[in-house]
Each structure stands twice: as C-alpha cells, then as structure tokens.
Amino acid sequence: MENERDEIAAAGAKVVEMLGACAAAPDDLEVGRAADEALMDLDRLLTSTDAT
C-alpha cells in the first residue's frame, strides 16, 4: 500500500508541476496536452487503487 501512495503522490506532484507550466505558457498546446495526460494518469491511479 505504501508503494501505491508513493505513486499517487508522485502523480499529484506531476499534476501540480504541469499546472504551473500551463500558467507560465497558457497558449502552448503541448504543455496543455502534457498536463491533461498527467491528470488522467492521476485519475487512473486513484480509481484503480484503494487510496485510503
């Protein structure tokens, strides 16, 4: 379970990083796509594991 939490924490950190990148470059489509992918990765982790 600790490994799952580490994965979720890392995915969450990536989302925060990508949101910052989006704020810095709001017109950059590649950054937007990367942020969307990071958010989908986090969503998959949260829905496929018991995050409690």
Image (spheres, grey):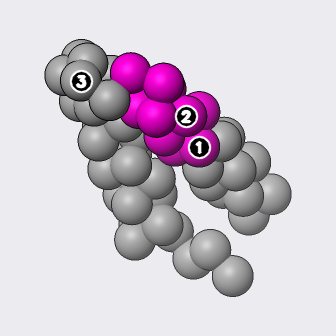
Q: Number of numbered discs present?
A: 3
Looking at the image, residue 37 lies above or below residue 34: below
Residue 32 image-quadrant placement: top left
Q: Position of residue 13 (x, y in %)?
A: 65, 42
Q: Are marks 1 and 3 in contact (CB under 8 Å)?
A: no
Label 1–label 2 contact, CB within 8 A: yes
Looking at the picture, does residue 6 appear above or below residue 19?
A: below
> Residue 37's x, y, as percent?
30, 37
Which secondary structure lies at badge 1?
helix
The mark lying in front, picked from 3 and 2, is 3
Where is mark 1, residue-wise? Answer: 16
In the image, taking residue 7 as reference, residue 25 lies left or right, namely left
**Mark 3 falls on what kind of element?**
loop
Q: Amino acid at mark 2?
A: Gly
* Residue at 32%, 50% in the rendered image: 40
Specify the amino acid type for callout 3.
Asp
Quadrant assignment, res 43: bottom left
Judge from the rendering whether residue 44 lies leftward or rightward of residue 19; answer left or right: left
Extent of the magenta region: 15-25
User: Label 3: which residue?
Assistant: 27
Q: Nearer the viewer, mark 1 or mark 2?
A: 2
Residue located beneath label 2 in the image: 20
Q: Give me the residue at 80% from left, 57% from top.
A: 2
Q: Residues within 10 Å of mark 2 (few under 14, many from 20)?
A: some
Which residue: 70% across, 50% down?
A: 9
Vertical placement of 20 versus 15: above or below? above
Inter-mark Cα distance, 3 to 2: 13 Å
